[in-house]
Image: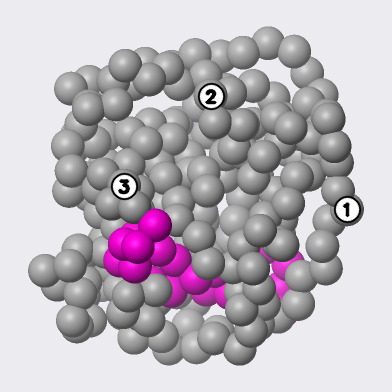
Amino acid sequence: MNKFVSALAVLTVGGTVLASGVATAAAAPGSSNAHKPHKVARSTSAAHGKATPLKSTTAAKASAKASATPKVNAGDSVTAKQYNFLSYRALDADTDTLGGNGTRVQLWDDAGSDAANQTWVYTSTDTVGLYKINNLASGRSLDADSDTIGGNGTTVQLWDDLGTGQANQLWWLIDTGYYDVDSGNELFKWQNYQSGRVLDADSDTIADNGTTVQLWDDLGVDAYNQDWEF
């Protein structure tokens, strides 16, 4: 990575609450987090599908104090964990397969700030909103398996970083325009550059640790298993 920028410096408050009304969704059936409500509210005027720089995670506080959008340069990096909105589990690189290419990517209970396999480095490219995502523990890139990339259910794994010209390892950060009422964090989608499909937590296995993470057609802003927060 060319340059590391403090997550606190880059993940600043942005936007304001523009519309009233709160939507509520049920937690994943059987989930350890099932008691936690899933409530979303409109946070920005951005239309769903718009790529955005990694600049804002706390839209709910923006009405109290807003800050300017920081300049994003190619090679700037942010290190942070991220969580699936439906399960509230962390994006996780399987420690049993972490030593080589093909590492399984899954959801798992948050193991704390020292869990490097659940920590990710987001490096900006020279295109605004387009990122490389590398696992802190292994250094390998979040990769959409080229053998299965032609359809829904594409395997998401870790693979050696093949550079910014490797389309299946590039990800658009998509602003949904909504935030998590409970945490105040903005909700995003990650869209794979090559396939156009989004990072998806398999709804059939989302109630448990080890939830499969895959690519799937974008099902819209209320597909909470495709929504992510930092």
Q: CA distance from mark 1 to mark 3?
A: 31 Å
The amino acid beneath tag 2 is: Asp
The percent coordinates of residue 181 (x first, y second) are 58, 23
Image quadrant in which the N terminus is located: bottom right
Q: Earlier in the sequence, mark 2 or mark 1?
A: 1
- Of residues 63 and 200, the one nearer the viewer is 63
Is residue 52 visible from the viewing direction of this image?
Answer: no
Q: Please report the residue visible at 48 percent of the width from the left and 39 percent of the height from the top.
A: 227
* Labelled disc at residue 110: 3
Q: How far across and how far down the image is residue 179, in percent?
A: 61, 31
**Helix or strand or loop: what does disc 1 sit on?**
loop
Image location (x, y in percent) of residue 122: 54, 69
Q: Which residues are magenta?
A: 113-135
Q: Which mark is residue 182?
A: 2
Residue 134: name its quadrant.
bottom left
The reply to whether dot 2 and dot 1 touch (C-beta < 8 Å) is: no
52 w.r.t. 42: above or below: below
